[in-house]
Image (cartoon, rainbow, N blue to C red):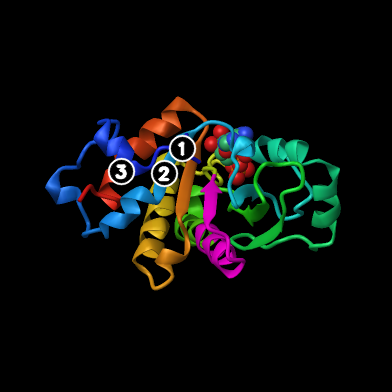
Amino acid sequence: LKDIKTIGQLYKSAVLKAPATDKIRHKLNPRFLDRVSLFQGDITKLEVDSIVNAANKSLLGGGGVDGAIHSAAGPKLLEECRGLNGCDTGDSKITKGYNLPAKHIIHTVGPVYSSSSKEEKAEQLASCYNTSLKLAVANSLRHIAFPSISTGIYGYPIVDATRIALEVARQFCDSEVGDKLDRIIFVVWSNKDKGVYESLIPEYFPPS
Ligand code: ADP
């Protein structure tokens, strides 16, 4: 965890820059600058209470981050997943982490993007983040690390998806249960996705 920089630290090192004032939505409680992080790298390597898997409805493994998580966690994960009877789009289910350094995996099913039903897809993606955060709190987990759900094989445009992820996280921080998590980590894989998060984080999590 100490290698994962918080947005507070990213402001100090000028990786993140304060946004133009007209872009700031609302004031943030400054303690969340030390609780939200952006990390570029492999989510399967994180030693945290929970990582989120961008799964498919079967929960029986797939490509992308799902494949990476199943191969790193080992076959016992698949065994537990078989007993879960799949998962609806926008919903989440929790398992143990098995061979992963993470204690738990929260499997969420993102929408397959289509521009013809944008609003429904946006609600489903927001629901992925919301139900995952709820599961972490319900299981007394203190950290959650999210990959960029639906933006790989499922084709969700990265800017729109990132705005949804940040909006839900911001709402969580402003909510009554906002203090129940010590770290919310956004994990990006590509340089392009990192750039998108770096440019949008200041709008949702402005420096104090
Ligand atoms: P989806 O099917 O929901 O679109 P993908 O797994 O295809 O999910 O992609 C989701 C995101 O996860 C993409 O940005 C992809 O680059 C990223 N990703 C793939 N492997 C890893 C990994 N090991 N750690 C973190 N992110 C990853």
Q: Quadrant of residue 200?
A: top left
Q: Earlier in the sequence, mark 2 or mark 3?
A: 3
- x 30%, y 52%: residue: 204
Front position in the image: 53 or 176: 176
Q: Secondary structure at mark 3?
A: helix
Alpha carbon separation for disc pair 2 and 3: 8 Å
Image location of residue 165, percent across then percent down: 44, 52
Q: Are marks 2 and 3 in contact (CB under 8 Å)?
A: no
Q: Is mark 3 within 8 Å of ligand 1?
A: no
Q: Is residue 200 visible?
A: no
State the mark number for residue 8.
Answer: 3
Question: Within the magenta stretch, is there residue 158?
Answer: no
Front position in the image: 156 or 96: 96
Question: Within the magenta stretch, is there residue 136?
Answer: yes
Q: Are marks 2 and 1 in contact (CB under 8 Å)?
A: yes
State the mark number for residue 37.
Answer: 2
Alpha carbon separation for disc pair 2 and 1: 7 Å
Q: Earlier in the sequence, mark 2 or mark 1?
A: 1
State the mark number for residue 132.
Answer: none
Badge 2: residue crowd in 10 Å (few <14, some 14–19, many ≥20)? many
Q: Secondary structure at mark 2?
A: strand
Identify residue for label 1.
Answer: 4
- x 25%, y 31%: residue: 14
Image location of residue 161, percent across then percent down: 45, 47
Badge 1: residue crowd in 10 Å (few <14, some 14–19, many ≥20)? some
Q: How many marks?
A: 3
Alpha carbon separation for disc pair 3 and 1: 11 Å
User: Which residues fall within the magenta stretch?
Assistant: 128-146
